Every structure is written in C-alpha cells, then in structure tokens.
Amino acid sequence: MLNENIKELRKAKGLSQQELAVRLNVVRQTVSKWEQGLSVPDAQMLISLSEVFETPVSALLGETVTQQSPDDIKAISEKLETINLQLARRDDLRRKVLHYIFIAILVAIVAVSALLISFHSPYLNWDFADPETAFMGTTFHIFEWAFVRVAPFLFIAAIFGIVLTGKRV
C-alpha cells in the first residue's frame, strides 16, 4: 500500500525517482526500494515525503492512491461551478431582499413623518383628564417622542443600506 502510494504520488507530481531522491537527500535506489516494497521510509522520511507530495502522512499510509482521470476532474469542476452559481444566486437574492427592506424602512419613515406633520402634534391638545383620550394621548405621545428621536438615525441608515446594497456594475 505505502509503496504504491509513493509511486502514484511521485508520478502525479511529475517527478522521476532521481528527482524525488534529490529532494529527500537520499539515493535513487532508496526510492526504488520504497516503491518496490523492499523497504519502508522511517518516520522522519514519511514526514518529508508528505511535504514533497503535499499530502498528509495518513494518506501515504492509508488506502491506495489512484490518479484521478480527466473525466473525474471535469465532473468535480462542474459540480463546483454549480455550487458557486447557487451561492452567487443566494447572495444576490439576500442583497435584493436587504435592498427592498431598506427602501421599505425609508418609505415608512417618510410616510409616518408626513402623517405627524399633517396632524400638527394633536396629543398636545388632548384632554388628559378624560380617561378615554388620556390613554390614547399618552400612547400617541410616547410613539411620537420615540419616533422623533429614532427616525433620523433609521433614515440615514436606510439611505446607506440602499446605497450599499444597490446593484453593482
């Protein structure tokens, strides 16, 4: 198993036995013996082999390594392309949803502001001694007070959000 893996990985890297031996500071016959299964590299040499082949030591010691055919690589690349397309579509959809949420926030702020301006702050004129209008007046007063303090920040954030999530050219 190890001997076959060394041979397959060496060939996959396009190295001759001599080139691999030079990289590992051993003689070519040592590499040949490893590939024939007549000897095995020690632990330190296994680490060096894994670095040269850019693969974990466990892969060297594990199952037989087989070269992938061009059809396998093409299938994998097509799957990766499909996944990338799906991720791009999902990101584009998220961007569009956020864009429309920011537009809705902006429209809502403008609409509520227009309503408040047109009513000329009616809660100041309400009779808070009357129990029927006291509750409504207090509720409206709290809403308007909170809106006036929060709306400018939301307005600016919505504008930035619309700009940042706008269609990129």
Image (cartoon, helix red, strand yellow):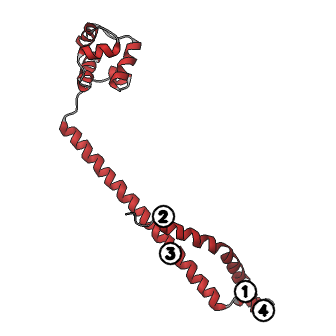
Mark sitting earlier along the chain (4/2): 4
Q: Are marks 3 and 1 in contact (CB under 8 Å)?
A: no
Residue 76, located in which quarter of the rendered image? Answer: top left
| Image depth: mark 1 or mark 2 in front | 2
* 126 with respect to 12 (left or right): right
What quarter of the picture does the N terminus occupy? top left
Q: Which residue is mark 1?
A: 137
What quarter of the picture does the C terminus occupy? bottom left
Q: Residue at x 57, y 78 (%)?
A: 109
Q: Are marks 4 and 2 in contact (CB under 8 Å)?
A: no
Residue type, mark 4 in image: Asp
Mark sitting earlier along the chain (4/3): 3
Q: Which residue is mark 2?
A: 164
Would you place residue 104 above or below residue 82 in this image? Answer: below
Mark 4 nearby-residue class (10 Å; few <14, some 14–19, many ≥20): few
Judged from the image, the secondary structure of the residue bearing numbered disc 3 is helix
Of all residues shown, which one is farthest toward the front?
Answer: 169
CA separation, marks 4 and 3?
A: 35 Å
Mark sitting earlier along the chain (1/4): 4
Q: Which mark is residue 127?
A: 4
Q: Residue at x 77, y 89 (%)?
A: 131
Judged from the image, the secondary structure of the residue bearing numbered disc 2 is helix
Q: Which mark is residue 104?
A: 3
CA separation, marks 1 and 2?
A: 39 Å
Mark sitting earlier along the chain (3/1): 3
Q: Position of residue 82 (x, y in %)?
A: 28, 51
Q: Residue at x 27, y 47 (%)?
A: 79
Q: Are marks 2 and 3 in contact (CB under 8 Å)?
A: no
